[in-house]
Amino acid sequence: MHLRIALLGYGKVGRALVAMLAEKADALRDRHHVTIGIVGIMTRSDGGWLSVEGFSPAAVIASGWPATRLPEGARAFDGDSLAFARTAPSDVLVELTTLNPMTGQPALDYVRAALTAGKSVVTANKGPIAHAYRHLRALAEDNSVSLRFESTVMDGTPIFNMAAASLPATTITGIRGLLNSTSNYVLSRMALGDSLDEAIIGAQRLGIAEANPANDLEGWDAAVKSAVLANVLMDADLRPADVRRDGLGAEAMRQAHSALLPGQRLKQIAVLTRVEGMVGANVVLAPLGPDDLLAHLSGMEAGLILSTDTMGDLTIIEGEGGPGQTAHGVMADLVAVAATLSGSRPSGTDRQ
């Protein structure tokens, strides 16, 4: 199977993905019977290009674009990102644009346009899945294409693919997780004696916190991820604004940290519950005792505990993630799309 992909967004994750596809080209061909050609890349700052014939990932890297010239034989794309999503000559749109936690836009429009045009979509952007999963799932099914998003929660850690492949006929009754690596890093540094301001500056120096870290500290990032988990794994129809965010933010962190008892660790925890068929979610600052597994996750580690009716509690832990892990999740989704197109798997998103 030769899979033609177009990338919308070419930041850290996009570049890590192309590098991984080049490095793993032989393994993808020999083990999974798929080769991947890149037929276009679109960026916000450097414009974009298209090529009907496409290039190998290694050739894209060798071209030096966007620092140098376009790949030889490519043509500059003079439309906008929405037109690129709709018209790129690809089997798959890989959507890697910036998250808008409040609306999911404009990524939501990009994903919708590609699906409507008959392209499968692989995205690492949690906004569209948090705000319109049911609509996008139906759109993919109506157009006999795939929608995949493994990298939207905990980087490329297999959550959705694991649940789909390994938990048949299983009901997930609850989820409890430490989902935001920035807040966990800050709280871990505070546990070691740093002030909140010192911990935030350290996170900014590492590149894991924005100049204004409010989305992380006030729970918006965790709320978006909670909506994704609820919608996909618990068949809910939540939006990030439906997720309660109780007692969060910088001042709340200071106060809660000063009130900790000996042996406790303060963590930002997402809690999803199913009560009489209704799914609710909230994000809280919680003092955890030493018998709580999530209390022992430090730095940029993340963790998820799935409560199920068939397997009891299942725990997934991610070490310190980053663009490479996110890229791996995207690559895994591309392999799955290739399998679908070659006829060995059903199309659409019925895996969820």
Image (cartoon, rainbow, N blue to C red):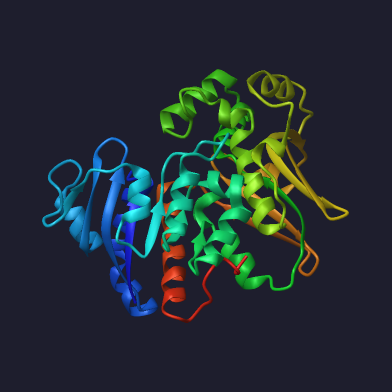
Q: Nearer the viewer, residue 32 or 90?
A: 90
- Residue at the (37%, 51%) spot, across then down: 85
| Image location of residue 319, percent across then percent down | 53, 50
Whether residue 154 can be seen here? no
Whether residue 176 can be seen here? yes
Place residue 98 in its image quadrant: top left
* Image quadrant occupied by the C terminus: bottom right
| Image location of residue 198, percent across then percent down | 52, 20
- Residue furthest to the bottom: 344
Q: Judge left or right: residue 284 versus residue 16.
A: right
- Residue at the (57%, 50%) spot, across then down: 129
| Image location of residue 209, percent across then percent down | 48, 30
- Residue at the (72%, 53%) spot, across then down: 236
Q: Judge left or right: residue 114 versus residue 163.
A: left
Residue 186 vs 269, above or below: the answer is above
* Image quadrant occupied by the N terminus: bottom left
Q: Nearer the viewer, residue 275 or 305?
A: 275
Residue 91 vs 15, above or below: the answer is below
- Residue at the (42%, 28%) spot, across then down: 205
Q: Judge left or right: residue 173 versus residue 54.
A: right
| Image location of residue 95, percent across then percent down | 41, 50
Q: Nearer the viewer, residue 217 or 231?
A: 231
Total tally of numbered discs in the picture = 0
- Residue furthest to the right: 276
